[in-house]
Image: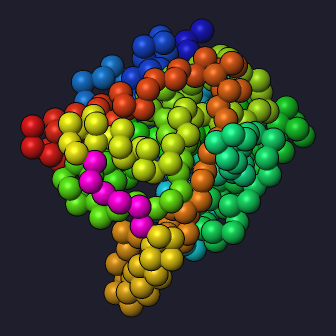
Amino acid sequence: MSNTVFITGANGMLGASVTREALAQGFKVKAQILPGSNRDVLADLNIEITEGNILDSDFLDRELSNCQFVINIAALTTIWPRRLQSIYEVNLQGVKNIASVARKYGLQRMVQIGTANSFNHGTKDNPGNELQNYTGGQFKMDYMDSKYVAQCYLLDRFKNENFPVVILNPTYMIGPFDSGPTSGRMLLELYKNKLPGYASGGKNFVYSKDVAVATVNALHMGRLGQCYIVGNENLYFGEMFKKAADVFDQPFKIKQFPGFAINAVGAVNSLIARISGKAPQLSYSMAKMASVKQFYNPDKARKELNLPSTPIETAIADCIGWYKENGYLPK
């Protein structure tokens, strides 16, 4: 039997690495991208590219009928405006559509990419894990809420009808193919000496290629109906930026800003954004999150999905190297 995997969002940052990892592990790949979207990161790969939308059930019915697996990476990650109906349409209804068609054709397994924010974070000494409850509602962001609701939906389908799903919950990813740029934006700003400072919080940072390995491994490893936090190093922002400056061979000059100052800037930016209609680089909700220590324990994924633990310095170097190769920075 052919091992064909349907990968949604294949031309995104994670999708591009997952597509390459699936090929490396011997899978045939059918890669979904949105109609008219850029496919440069998939150029020269031995894959079938199909244009369509996960909100289109007829499209999914055609494309999944001859597949054995599906990896759903497609998502609307918008965090401004915080409340937007289209976020739920993609992140929840899209998931429902995929799950229903996957069940119809008896696919062997669905791997869903969620977010670590679906679980409460912890401290460095006691980081959050998959047993923690969801507390992200406090930030009032449809992105976080929709990903959590979609996760609950899939786990309910597993519980009620033994739907074959595994959910991966990545932390903050760093790596190549970040054409947005999205998570790599702060590294770009630091590299160009345009980052004014940093907040007191921190995150769990992970190499996107490590997430890709765990994602494809989840097609044949891990337990059905389980969630796996996929991360690596718990770092305060100051620690992260110091590592990045060392990779760049630049002096580490930026300072930590007090929380009240960051919150004030975020509040003003949000007000201006509501008036102008342009998304702010730092909203009030983002400012509040920047002071939170979002630390997690990825041991479950390490043990059950063979999640690698590549040093974050490697991820930073790969990210910046990709930006240089693709014109975001001078070589």
Q: Is residue 54 above or below residue 161?
A: below
The color scheme shown is: rainbow
Q: Is residue 203 above or below residue 27?
A: below
Q: Quadrant of residue 220?
A: top right
Q: Quadrant of the N terminus?
A: top right
Residue that lies at the very extreme toward the left in this rendered image: 330
Q: Going 84% across and 45% down the picture, which residue do you hit?
A: 156
Q: Quadrant of the C terminus?
A: top left
Q: Quadrant of residue 291?
A: bottom right
Left or right of 254 in this view: 66: right
Report the front residue among 276 and 28: 276
Q: Going 47% across and 70% down the picture, which residue do you hit?
A: 258
Visible in this render: residue 155? yes
Report the front residue among 204 and 2: 204
Magenta segment boundaries in residue numbering:
252-257
Visible in this render: residue 100? no
54 drawn magenta = no
Q: Is residue 308 above or below residue 243?
A: above
Magenta span main SS = loop
